[in-house]
Image (cartoon, rainbow, N blue to C red):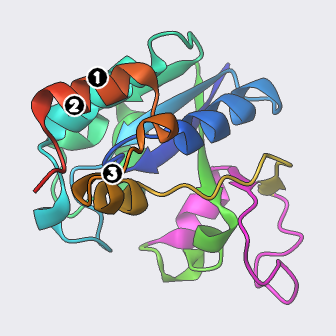
Amino acid sequence: MKKVGLYFGTFNPIHIGHLIIANHMVEFSDLDEVWLVITPQSPFKTKKTLLEDHHRHQMVYEATAAYPKLKPSKIEFDLPQPNYTINTLVHLLEKYVEGYEFSLIMGEDNLKGLHKWKNYETILEHHHIYVYPRITDGFSNHKFKGHPKIHHVDAPIVEVSSTFIRQQHKAGKNIRAMLPDAVWRYMDEMNFYRN
């Protein structure tokens, strides 16, 4: 049974924080692979700020090329939008009927809002969730504390965001150190996020 962690995001753009977390999860947990699932449209974000799907997929592909246990996934590109995690999980289980076990990877901040997700009880019933820390007000008094399907991984706290990168790049700041080299080159060549 191959244990796959699904790391969902718009990756607009993918940055070193995403890579550090994905690599840490696959190296320091019982996951065999991490798939970076590029979301065409999150129910919580507006589409107008997003680069086209194929450009974001290309950047994730470039970023993960040197990491054999990290895979870009465009599984959500052909699913109805906005994308709900439960629908993607059902689709994956239909596509990969045997030999795969799918878990979710999310930040502690997202875990606190899990009860607002569509069919979150079904997700928890059938899938494990690997949680990485964020700088927040902590995990105490949280509804999912001690849940047997939720695993906290002591990953590095990385406070880099795609929003910050886009804003500062547009403002003319040098944000190259926050991006994998191949992503920076692609972004620069394509003149993304400059206006």
* Residue 109 visible, this angle: yes
Count of numbered circles in the view: 3
Q: Is residue 174 left or right of residue 159?
A: left
Q: Amino acid at mark 1?
A: Arg
Q: Residue 141, percent across and down?
A: 85, 90
Q: Residue 164, percent across and down?
A: 41, 62
SS at badge 1: helix
- Reading the image, the residue beneath label 2 is 188
CA separation in Å, label 2 and label 3? 19 Å
Q: Amino acid at mark 2?
A: Asp
- How dense is the environment of label 2, judged by Cα within 10 Å: few (below 14), some, or many (20 and up)? few
Q: Are marks 2 and 1 in contact (CB under 8 Å)?
A: yes
Disc number placed over residue 185 in the picture, else none: 1
Q: Which residues are magenta?
A: 119-148
Disc with the residue nearer the chain's start (2 vs 3):
3
- How dense is the environment of label 1, judged by Cα within 10 Å: few (below 14), some, or many (20 and up)? some
- Reading the image, the residue beneath label 3 is 10
